Image: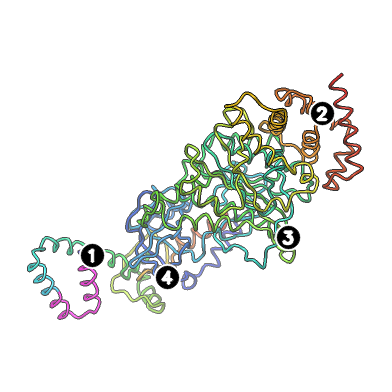
């Protein structure tokens, strides 16, 4: 049952309509109270938090080797369909940038290129 | 050194940060344990697709270059919010939050002639310390078996060098013959003798032998490799090993890897023989994986598709039509029974899939019969059409006679008063049982088997006491090799015992008997 209620709330949240979500939550709480199953509520919240955390992990993310490369990286990433608001500086990339969004990764860093060269040469 | 520097400089010069870096589909490990990884993302992933766990994504270049051994995974469950994959390698290196890349291809291994004489793991990586293999052709390890149109009937024998099998339960090239029995009854010995015996085949028609060791002790596999090497059999053999210490995923994949290697040779028009030792352990590994993947358990906790697991593997054994090159892949799966129970789940499944079975019995083994084959319930459903004329001629009634002997032998325990005819039958049965007794590691060439069985079925050994048959047979073989080389060659070349050959053979046998009686 917890799984079903969680999926229901997730589906409602995915519509993006806050008013509808509020109504759904109110009705669910009322229903659980009437059934004497309020104990399920914290578990449903925990499931929803897990889903939110998993979604966050797949959120758009842009890493750039140095601050001076940020504007070019943002532009390139946007061209390739990854629009981000925040940029992280990651010197381990050496040069270039890499972006992740909804399960897509574009890696244009010198680190990745050097690893590939190493693999080619040592293969 | 200079060439390496030049090559690296060339690669660096060619790198353009504004290009390349194709869009890759990635996921993130949600949880990992017991060799299974739960992955978020990878919405476009396919079943049985390979993924790469990127262990260096969050590390510095220096650390990344220190640890370049890749960790692969195989997707086995597609779920609503992610996928589940088995980890093919050291699962302790996979951790939560790790990036996973899709490779966009099914699990494949490299195959080629250079695998001959090598010991590899189910991913095709060498484990014999002889350096990398030069196999270049990648092939998916799971594939659809050949259909009816592409096949021809089994019509060429695969000689095991074991008299009892070649005479009574003949195996044809392209057949699937199950070897079944309790532990320690000689199942592996039959398989190994069959590999060793292929040395007697001419180079052109000698099958390539692939031995797949599943869940076995590494010491046993090492011993086996040493034995094959000592007997000169490694030059046409390949060993695929997934030892008991290997992850369940590799034990599950090992037979498929063996079949893939075998198919490579089959498609080149060659004959290949693959031995799966043993499928019981593969089934156990698959059960473990399925339970960890949270698939619903069925009978004996095996998953519902355990039959399909074995049927799709064994269906890949085939004798191809001439249009497809005429190659063949013979499969000798091995199943271990518990207390002789052939009606357990996995044994009955595999019995129903294969084209016959060689049943080894612990009682016969303890009585000293080698190989300990129970002739009554052993059968070859297609092999008899592949049997040579010579073998058919000499072994015609052996199976029936031995079955009658077993019945009479049981009856004899209750009655001491036997008529002459019954006594004669029992004596003949005992003698024949002794003739078919054959130690481990001494496979015989087909022509020698035919000559020995000819002598036994035509009464040339009737004057010898059953207990002395072993010694007499050894002498007979030595005598035939020495005195009747021409006859053996004639049988080998014509694959039959022609009238004139039979006449000469009888003369030689008469001389042998006379010499023995003297």
Marks 3/2: CA–CA distance: 37 Å
Marks 4/2: CA–CA distance: 67 Å
Q: Is residue A7 magenta?
A: yes
Query: Which residue is denoted by mark 1 in the rendering?
Result: A3
Which numbered dot is residue B36? Answer: none
Query: Which residue is denoted by mark 3 in the rendering?
Result: B326
Residue B460 in view of the camera: yes
Query: Which residue is denoted by mark 2 in the rendering?
Result: B478
At x 49%, y 51%, the residue is: B252
Classify residue B469 as left or right of residue B42.
Answer: right
Q: Are marks 1 and 4 on the same chain?
A: no
User: Residue B243 in the image: x percent, y percent?
Assistant: 51, 42
Q: Are marks 1 and 3 on the same chain?
A: no
Residue B316's place in the image compared with B360, above or below, is below
Q: Nearer the viewer, mark 1 or mark 4?
A: 1
Element at label 1:
helix
Q: Are marks 4 and 3 on the same chain?
A: yes
Among the two numbered marks 3 and 2 on one chain, the one whose residue lies closer to the N terminus: 3
Read off the chain for label 1. Answer: A
Badge 3 density bin: few <14, some 14–19, many ≥20, Cα 10 Å: some
Classify residue A74 as left or right of residue B184.
Answer: left
Classify residue A5 as left or right of residue B413.
Answer: left
Query: Which residue is denoted by mark 4 in the rendering?
Result: B44
Q: Nearer the viewer, mark 4 or mark 3?
A: 3
Q: Nearer the viewer, mark 1 or mark 2?
A: 2
Classify residue B2 as left or right of residue B30.
Answer: right
């Amino acid at each position: 049952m917890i799984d079903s209620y969680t999926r229901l709330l997730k589906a409602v949240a995915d519509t993006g309509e806050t008013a509808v979500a509020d109504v759904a939550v109110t009705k669910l709480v009322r229903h659980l109270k009437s059934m004497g199953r309020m104990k399920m509520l914290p578990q449903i919240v925990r499931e929803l938090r897990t889903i939110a955390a998993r979604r966050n992990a797949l959120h758009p993310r842009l890493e750039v080797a140095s601050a001076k490369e940020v504007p070019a990286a943002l532009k390139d990433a946007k061209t390739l369909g990854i629009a981000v608001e925040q940029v992280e500086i990651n010197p381990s990339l050496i040069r270039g940038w890499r972006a992740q969004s909804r399960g897509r990764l574009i890696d244009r860093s010198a680190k990745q290129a050097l690893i590939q060269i190493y693999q080619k040469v040592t293969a | 050194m200079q060439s390496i520097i030049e090559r690296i400089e060339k690669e660096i010069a060619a790198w353009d940060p504004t290009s390349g870096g194709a869009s890759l589909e990635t996921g993130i490990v949600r949880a990992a344990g017991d060799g299974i990884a739960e992955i978020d993302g990878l919405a476009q992933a396919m079943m049985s697709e390979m993924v790469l766990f990127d262990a260096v994504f969050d590390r510095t270049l220096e650390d990344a270059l220190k640890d370049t051994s890749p960790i692969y995974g195989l997707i086995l469950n597609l779920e609503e919010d992610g996928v589940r994959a088995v980890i093919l390698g050291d699962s302790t290196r996979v951790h939560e939050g790790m990036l996973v890349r899709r490779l966009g291809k099914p699990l494949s291994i490299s195959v080629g002639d250079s695998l001959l004489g090598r010991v590899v793991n189910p991913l095709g990586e060498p484990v014999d310390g002889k350096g990398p293999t030069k196999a270049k052709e990648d092939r998916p390890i799971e594939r659809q078996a050949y259909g009816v149109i592409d096949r021809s009937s089994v019509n060429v024998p695969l000689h095991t060098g074991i008299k009892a099998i070649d005479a009574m339960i003949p195996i044809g090239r392209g057949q699937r013959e199950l070897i079944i029995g309790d532990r320690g009854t000689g199942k592996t010995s039959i398989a190994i003798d069959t590999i060793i015996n292929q040395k007697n085949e001419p180079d052109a028609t000698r099958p390539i032998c692939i031995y797949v060791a599943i869940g076995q002790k590494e010491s046993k596999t090492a011993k086996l490799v040493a034995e094959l090497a000592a007997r000169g059999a490694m030059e046409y053999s390949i060993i695929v090993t997934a030892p008991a210490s290997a992850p369940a995923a590799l034990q599950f994949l090992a037979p498929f890897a063996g079949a893939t290697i075998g198919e490579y040779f089959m498609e080149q028009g060659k004959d290949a023989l693959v031995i799966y030792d043993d499928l019981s352990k593969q089934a156990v590994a698959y059960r473990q994986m399925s339970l960890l993947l949270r698939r619903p358990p069925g009978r004996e906790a095996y998953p519902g598709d355990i039959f399909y697991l074995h049927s799709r593997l064994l269906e890949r054994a085939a004798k191809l039509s001439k249009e497809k090159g005429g190659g063949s892949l013979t499969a000798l799966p091995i199943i271990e029974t518990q207390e002789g129970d052939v009606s357990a789940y996995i044994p009955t499944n595999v019995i129903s899939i294969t084209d016959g079975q060689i049943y080894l019995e612990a009682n016969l083994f303890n009585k000293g019969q080698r190989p300990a084959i129970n002739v009554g319930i052993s059968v070859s459903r297609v092999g008899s059409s592949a049997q040579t004329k010579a073998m058919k001629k000499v072994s015609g009634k052996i199976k029936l006679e031995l079955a009658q002997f077993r019945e009479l032998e049981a009856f004899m325990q209750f009655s001491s008063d036997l008529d002459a005819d019954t006594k004669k039958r029992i004596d003949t049965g005992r003698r024949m049982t002794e003739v078919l007794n054959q130690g481990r590691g001494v496979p015989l060439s087909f022509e020698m088997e035919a000559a020995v069985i000819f002598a036994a079925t035509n009464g040339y050994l009737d004057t010898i006491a059953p207990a002395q048959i072993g010694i007499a047979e050894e002498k007979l073989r030595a005598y035939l090799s020495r005195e009747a080389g021409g006859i053996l060659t004639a049988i080998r070349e014509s694959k039959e015992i022609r009238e004139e050959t039979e006449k000469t053979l009888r003369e030689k046998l008469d001389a042998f008997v006379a010499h023995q009686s003297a």
